[in-house]
Amino acid sequence: MATIEQFPQSKDARLSTGYGQTGQQERPYRTPPHNLDAEQALLGAILINNDAFDRVSDFLRSEHFVQEIHRRIFEIAGSMIRAGKLATPVTLKTFLGEHDVDGLTVPQYLARLASEATTIINAYDYGRSIYDLAMRRELISIGEDVVNVAYDAPVDSSPRDQIEEAERRLYQIAETGRYDGGFQRFSDALKIAVDMAARAYEREGSLSGIATGLSDLDRYMGGLQASDLVILAGRPGMGKTALATNIAFNIAKTYRSRTRADGAVETADGGVVGFFSLEMSAEQLATRIIAEQSGVASNKIRRGDITENDFRRVADAVTEMQQIPFYIDQTGGVSIAQLAARARRLKRQRGLDMLVVDYLQLMTGSKSRAENRVQELTEITTGLKTLAKELNIPIVACSQLSRQVEQRDDKRPQLSDLRESGSIEQDADVVMFVFREEYYLKNKEPRPGTEEHIAWMAQMESAHGRAEVIIGKQRHGPTGTIELQFDAEVTRFSTLAREDTIAEIR
């Protein structure tokens, strides 16, 4: 029987199997990318003219340098310059101690950096080169960590956790270290302001934010503003999920994009919507939206109790909705870390202009904190606000209210009714409550034929098909109440067909 030694091996085979010395000799040794010349040139430019530091200080940090001595020189020089002192080889040497640097003492090395520096004109380019190389080293580090953790993962670390951590670190690299910070000319700021006004003018309703499709609510809030965390709260049965779904679908339905002069595609109207449905399945949510768009009751759709005309309306609505940028994640019990990772992925792959979370109390923190639900909910709301700022999109999060609402005669909710944590009120930019008096009146029907029943019927007629959206907090605008029309059969909110729909609370 033949053995492996009896067959001649190619050079590639020896490299792959480890046989022979050739593979070991020819395997290249790779060092992490760096440029010591650029580091020395930048530090020298700073030592001869401290103005060079101001050209790179907004994006460059000491940890971006590859040599420890260079890190210390940059950090100490920066501290002195910020304090209004002069950073030169003479003033720096007393803070660096005695070391051997490539056969030179610290004073000799500082003098060499200063003497070989030519000009500060290229300081920005040197700094950018150093930063870019540091980012490449960080990418290598992330890749190595992914491999090492995958090989030797702790018992309590799942592959999903590793993927989310890698995505978080990669997104952090992608979104940090921009070179366009700092002061800008007022004329440039004016151009940006005019462009924003032009985009608002082109949007439906001429709003600064994203139109919700409910004109009274839009006039009160100016649309949903980028980076805002909007809490939509209510007791069960009030319709908070229906309102969130209506708003989200209205935004996705009006989506319109345009191509900028540089070839990039941006949203001109409406938006791409991500919907985390932690309570309902994607099928249930889709059925609700079909009912709302077609006008055919969702319970009839589920039972198949529809006429030929109803079926045609449903089919037409489904056909119209096929291309709408509305994405649903129906994973139950998702953590704030998982939600953030999936939102980042959606924004990177498809774009993302608005996010809905239904609802807060069904989410979990990064770690199990069953013994302290308040801290866990604080982590969730803080994480959502941070994500809204990071992605520069509005996030609408539904929330349950405590049962103390039911103990009052006037069951209109207040900020103090927000369940489990004061952090919801603190982190939110806008807090809205959904209230339907009709829901409570139905359960208080007096005995027919009595005067109380006549009065009750008058109240029911007045409250029928009406809902109140109470704005209890708005960081950049007034608080108040907006009345909306609500069709319970198709779970649809719409604007009341009358003028005096807004009543001030205060």
Image (spheres, rainbow, N blue to C red):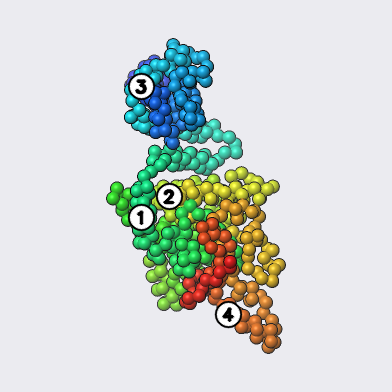
Q: Nearer the viewer, mark 4 or mark 1?
A: 1
Task: Report the Cα–Cα distance between label 1 and label 3.
Answer: 43 Å
Disc sitting over residue 347 in the figure? 2
User: Which sits earlier in the primary sequence, circle 2 or circle 4?
Assistant: 2
What type is the residue that disc 1 sits on? Val
Frontmost of labels 1 and 2 is: 1
Q: Residue at x 43, y 55 (%)?
A: 353
- Front-lying residue, 127 or 372: 127
User: Quick check: 199 left or right of 389?
Assistant: left
Determine whether the residue tagged by mark 2 lies in a helix, strand or loop.
helix
Residue 421 position, x and y percent, is 64, 53
Give the quadrant of the N terminus.
top left
Q: Earlier in the sequence, mark 3 or mark 4?
A: 3
Question: Neighbour class for label 1 at 10 Å: few (<14), some, many (≥20)?
Answer: few
Q: Is residue 293 above or below residue 98?
A: below
Tags 3 and 4 in contact by the CB under 8 Å rule?
no
The type of residue carrying mark 3 is Ala
| Rendered residue at 35%/54% (across/down) | 195
Judging from the image, what secondary structure is the residue with disc 1 in?
helix
Q: Position of residue 12 (x, y in %)?
A: 34, 23
Q: Which residue is mark 1?
A: 194
Give the residue pinned by disc 4. 462
Percent from the top left, x then y, of residue 2?
39, 21
Q: Could you tell me how far apart the alpha carbons at marks 1 and 2 are, in whole angstroms? A: 26 Å
Vertical comparison of 95 with 249: above or below: above
In primary-sequence order, the first of circles 1 and 3 is 3
Residue at 56% across, 55% down:
428
Q: CA distance from mark 4 to mark 1?
A: 46 Å
Q: Amino acid at mark 2?
A: Lys
